[in-house]
Amino acid sequence: MPPLAPPSDLDHVPAPPGPPLTTTEKESLRRSLRHCDPSVFAAACVYRRTGDTTAAAAVVRGIVEHHTPSDRQLLLLASPSDLRLQEDLGLDSLALLEIFSVTEDALGFNLDADGLRSLRTLGDMLASIGRLSRAQSNLGQRA
């Protein structure tokens, strides 16, 4: 399946460029995303360096795509924001836990476990991670 197009669910909010990832950081990131399309690794590198929320959304979509059963992946090409994580995409609680864990590793920040439990749709997930991403970028700018 081809990589998903960049989503429009998040505002494009780039942070000032940061230092390039170290070799160790890249290796760790590559391990975390080893089952995803290579474009997800590239987007994660862009996010880690720039804080660009569009790249963060591409990472999340790629991770979700990997965990979505193959018979439901075509749904991701239609109107992904409205797709319910469990009912439409067939993601069980274990898959969601794995998605959140890999997302944390890929983006380099902790997700709010309580807030994540309330997410019902892919759009909810993208919006939540977008807010956390922007907050993380703002913290980085102040440091």
Image: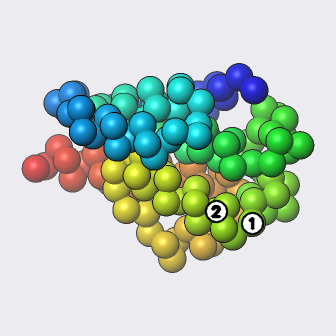
- Confirm or deny contact between disc 2 and disc 1 (CB under 8 A): yes
Q: Quadrant of residue 85?
A: bottom right
| Picture colour scheme | rainbow
The residue lying at 65 percent from left, 26 percent from top is: 3
Above or below: residue 107 compared with residue 91: above
Mark seen at residue 92: 1
Residue 129 in sight: no
- Residue furthest to the bottom in view is 114
Instruction: Give the percent coordinates (x, y) of residue 5.
Output: 64, 25
Secondary-structure class at tag 2: helix
In this orientation, which residue lies closer to the viewer: 70 or 115?
A: 70
In the rendered structure, the answer to whether residue 36 lies left or right of residue 48 reads right
In this orientation, which residue lies closer to the viewer: 135 or 101?
A: 101
- Between marks 2 and 1, how big is the CA–CA gap? 6 Å
Name the residue that disc number 2 marks. 96
The residue lying at 59 percent from left, 30 percent from top is: 37
Instruction: Give the percent coordinates (x, y) of residue 15.
Output: 27, 34
Secondary-structure class at tag 1: loop
Quadrant (top left, top right, bottom left, bottom right) of the N terminus = top right
In the rendered structure, the answer to whether residue 5 lies left or right of residue 27 reads right
Q: In which quarter of the image is residue 61?
A: top right
